[in-house]
Image (spheres, helix red, strand yellow):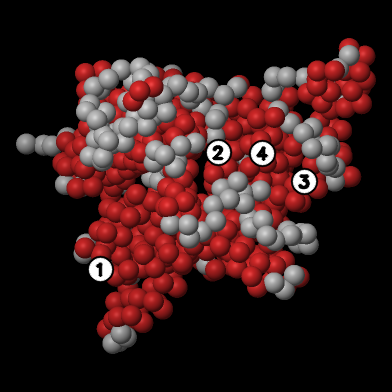
Amino acid sequence: MFLNVVVKRLLIAVPTLLALTIILFLMVKAIPGDPAQLLLGDKATPESLQQVREELGLNKPIAVQYGIYLYNLVVNFDMGNSISSQEPVISLIGDKFPATIELSVMAILFAMLVGVPIGLIAASRPGSFVDFTSMSTAVFGVSMPVFWLGLILMWIFGLALGWLPISGRLGIDYYYEPTTGFLLFDSLFIEQDIEMFRDALAHLILPAITLGTIPMAFLARITRASMLEVLQQDFIRTAKAKGVTFWKIYLVHSFKNASIPITTILGLQFGTLLAGAIITETIFSWPGMGNWILSSVNARDIPALEGGVIAVAAAFVLINLVVDVLYRLIDPRIRLS
Amino acid sequence: MTVSLRQKQWNSFKRHRPGVIGLLMIAALMVLAVFAGLLSPVDPNVQNMDLKFLPPIWLDGGKWPYILGTDVLGRDLFSRVLYGARLSLMIGSLAVFTGAVMGVPLGMVSGFFGGKIDTLIMRIVDIMLAFPSLLLAICIVAIMGPSLENAILSIGIVTIPTYARVARASVLMEKEKEYVLADIALGRKSLPILIKGILPNVFGPLLVVASLGFGGAVLDAAGLSFLGLGAQPPVPEWGALITEGKKYIFQAWWLILFPGFAILLTVVGFNLFGDAVRDVFDPKSVKS
């Protein structure tokens, strides 16, 4: 039964992804500007333009163009070459994605390690001063303009105090040849250079806090709300009547039950983070997907834009799928429904 | 004496302290926006190179009437932030309007008629939701070209699914009620039933989405402007002000700090208000 649900979900994800590529393909076609002209620049002659259009298949009907794009993507795993760097889009995605994933994972860790305790503390004394302070923090957190927070953090901890690096993934003293592309992993296990690992970690702190603040605030609110709801239920009263201590009821009995909505929000936020990374990456010159997509927009680098957006959207769909499945695993009540 | 439902809702809103604070913040913003012309000491676009990078008035070198200091061209930051309040209210209203005006009819039709049309609309909505919204907004702006108008439109478009879903869910609940069944039995046409009968009754949930969406729209518009895809200089939109100030983070931190506070407080105001409206319309969540 459970497997059925997983398979069904996967089957729904495929047409969604397909529809995404169609919409995106049409949207990108609507971007003003001639790709052939962009590729050749000012020195283009009418003949050479014609030739490039021929090569890129730009003269064919749009449905055929889409068919070719999809065929290349699915069968050859090829998304064309980037106009600005001339490199295959697929390998560029391979270069950039690990940086974004690393940043997003650190951001979600920050959100969890700060947000969940805030929610737990707030819910332990509802209506108290602690509750008020925590929830005010959370309201400000969800309303935070991320780019502003990033700049302020950069200004205080990077420029004024000089404690943390503010740009890129690694100091210029280090030479880095990516193996997995996950810098923390590579520096620790491949290069086995603890100083390099520390430097990479230091570079992650400010961007991760910037990116993680909104999810942190969401998690704090959802943790508080779910805890308060669980605490009202009968089994908690039974536990109290049996003489179980407050903290055991609170952290074991209640938190276990409250963790279901928390997990859901966590997963949903993780998907949103990938896209939210665009702004954070721009501030901290982080060499990830967001920065790349934005510069592709500005350079009208259509193959790169297409590839980048499809990759992020696909990751978003997949993460939502995983969350959905996980959440059925955690909660037996909805596993079979 | 009987008290109407609206009256009851208003009474319970008045007891919701964060909500009242939010409403007061919104009211203050509106006053600032409406009277920006009267309140701003200097024309926000007047340049004066002799006065460039003046710090806020309480710091050494600050000069009246440049309360929050000046920028690289000697323009008064306080006046620019005030005029930015106008823009932000406009951005929020237009984006919410765009999303609602397209999403609500789609959702209502979907919920009311059901069947194939429902499946079709909801599939499209699902696909739109499969896109991270900021990414979708960026793609739309990339197509239409960067400008404040296009940023507002794209933010409105990416919120269509939310309005459609909420409207659909509310219509599904309403259409089983007796007043709708009676209308159908009397042979009234679908459109009047939807507009005159059902729409006023699904207003509550939509208001919740709209007021929370307002803050989100202001935030997203500022984000797009920050990325260079929204308002273009010299428009004093808050996100664009921060982008301009970013270059001078060493000399003039106030250029970043104050516009950001303006965004933060505006969004906090709308979020507090939206949360309160949700609690009022959905009594179940009041307890939690």
**Same chain shared by disc 2 and disc 4:** no
Task: State left or right for residue A256 relative to residue A176.
Answer: left
Question: Of helix, strand and loop, which one carries label 1?
Answer: loop
Q: Position of residue B114 (x, y in %)?
A: 54, 33
Question: Which residue reaches farthest top?
Answer: A46
> Given the image, on which type of amino acid does mark 1 rest?
Arg
Residue at (74%, 60%) from the top-left corner?
Answer: A176
Chain for numbered disc 1:
A
Neighbourhood count class around disc 4 (C-alpha, 10 Å): few under 14, some 14–19, many 20 upward: many
Query: Mark 4 highlights which residue?
Result: A293
Query: Mark 1 highlights which residue?
Result: A125
Among the 4 quarters of the image, the one containing residue A224: bottom left
Question: Of helix, strand and loop, which one carries label 4?
Answer: helix
**Same chain shared by disc 4 and disc 1:** yes
Q: In which quadrant will I find the N terminus of chain B?
A: top left
Chain for numbered disc 3:
A
Q: Is residue B230 above or below residue A76?
A: above
Question: Which residue reaches farthest left?
Answer: B1
Residue at (84%, 23%) from the top-left corner?
Answer: A40
**Front-most of B7 and A56?**
A56
> Given the image, on which type of amino acid does mark 2 rest?
Leu
Q: Are marks 3 and 1 in contact (CB under 8 Å)?
A: no
Disc 4 from disc 1: Cα separation: 45 Å
Q: Earlier in the sequence, mark 4 or mark 1?
A: 1
Disc 1 from disc 2: Cα separation: 37 Å
Disc 2 from disc 4: Cα separation: 12 Å
Disc 3 from disc 4: Cα separation: 11 Å
**Same chain shared by disc 3 and disc 4:** yes
Residue B134, disc: 2
